[in-house]
Image (cartoon, rainbow, N blue to C red):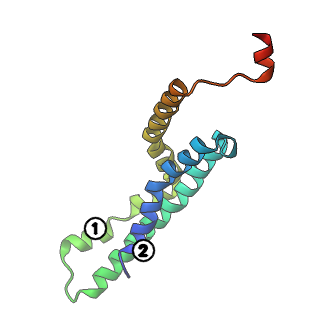
Amino acid sequence: MSPLIYIVPLSLFLLMPPILLGIRFVRCSSMPWWLFLLIVAGFGWLLVNFTVHAYYGYLGDLVKSYRDPPQKLLDELNADGAKLVFALLFGWLYGLLYSIPWLLVYSLIVGVRSIIKPRVATPAEAKAL
């Protein structure tokens, strides 16, 4: 088994929040906040679980490839219980927590955009002026 089996979902997990926030930045109406949070939590849970299971599957295949596997590798393979359970129960939380720094960057960019590009008045507001 190739290490790509767990590197690809990990990469998707790391790229998911900036891509979704980029979609929200460009087309705000197509990505409401509830949908953003739902996608980050749901797909975050799926990707975290797939990554953890694929990683331990890769380690298992790596151990099988040795005639006499190193003790460090065996210890890493046998220490999977808590990580698997935590990913199963709280994998959705990883995605939400990982999104916080990206949300800060997003709010900074939106703030700068609102300063540079002032809001255009609607026709009703223009008549009131």
Horizontal relation, residue 49 to residue 2: left or right: right
Q: In the image shown, does 28 or 95 lie closer to the viewer?
A: 28
Residue that appears at 48% across and 34% down: 109
Report the amino acid beneath label 2. Ile
The residue at 58%/48% (across/down) is: 23
4 left or right of 109 in image: left
69 versus 32 height, above or below: below
Relative vertical location of residue 66 with respect to residue 13 in this rendering, above or below:
below
Instruction: Count neighbours of disc 2 (C-alpha within 10 A) and say few if under 14, some if 14 to 19, many if 20 or more.
Output: some
Q: Residues within 10 Å of mark 1 (few under 14, many from 20)?
A: few
> Could you say which is closer to the camera, residue 24 or residue 1?
24
Horizontal side of 34 relative to 79 (left or right) equals right
Quadrant of image for the C terminus:
top right
Residue 120, percent from left and from top: 67, 25
Task: Find disc 1 in the rendering and name its residue.
Answer: 76
Q: Residue at horizontal 63%, vertical 24%?
A: 119
Q: Earlier in the sequence, mark 1 or mark 2?
A: 2
Tell me the quadrant of the picture where the N terminus can be found.
bottom left
Residue depicted at x 40% and y 58%: 82
Q: Quadrant of residue 2?
A: bottom left
The residue wearing badge 2 is 5
User: Where is residue 31 shown, x and y percent of the image?
Assistant: 65, 45
Q: Position of residue 99 (x, y in %)?
A: 48, 44
